[in-house]
Image: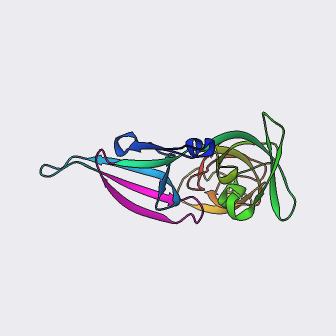
Amino acid sequence: MEYFAHDRLETRVATTNDLKNGMVLKLEGQLWQVVEFQHVKPGKGPAFVRTKLKNVLTAKNVDKTFNAGVKVETANVDRRDMQYLYNDGADYIFMDLETYEQYHVGADIVGDAKNYMLENSNVIIAMHEGQILFIELPASVVLEVTYTEPGLQGDRSNAGSKPATVETGYELQVPLFLEQGTKIKVDTRTGEYINRA
């Protein structure tokens, strides 16, 4: 059997026992990222792996079950440290921190990550065969509240919340006592307020 250099780079074979969150599988010619997985050993019958997969290109989520130990094809994903430079109206511009090469990434690929990216912030960009697949952010980021209604003095309860806009333009719910200019920690997975930074 003849191998071409790019074929060796492109895919590898693993078993369902090797699954990890963030791993990218190649199923039926499409790339799927493992969002979560669970090994299940029922009392009767063979063990299996229950997974939640996200289509890398369409962002569609599916639940898929595999028998334990089954071979799956994994895509070789190159994760690179990059710096978000700016948005030029159509694309988001990133710079590879090793090569200083710049990449133009469309809004469809950036998706909700735009809500948490400040200029000059570092992200990880996942690529497969030179194609940008998705952007990985830290679990939380610190952003400044640029607009919110004045806080209610003395209201330290968590009973209520109000909308606030942060410096990226993203709007989220925050506790009533928060003031404009406050730096807050935001969960990049849920888009929710965590605490004051």
Residue closer to the observer: 30 or 121: 30
Residue 91 lies, with reference to residue 97, above or below; the image says below
- Magenta stretch secondary structure, dominant: strand
Residue segment shown in magenta: 49-70
Q: Is residue 171 magenta?
A: no
Q: Position of residue 175 (x, y in %)?
A: 61, 55
Q: Is residue 55 magenta?
A: yes
Residue closer to the observer: 180 or 32: 32
Tell me the residue at 39%/62% (across/down).
63
Q: Is residue 82 shown left or right of residue 58?
A: right
Q: Residue furthest right?
A: 88
Tell me the residue at 44%/43% (across/down).
13
Q: Position of residue 126 (x, y in %)?
A: 64, 47
Give the quarter of the figure containing the C terminus.
Answer: top right
Q: Position of residue 115 (x, y in %)?
A: 70, 57
Q: Quadrant of residue 87?
A: bottom right
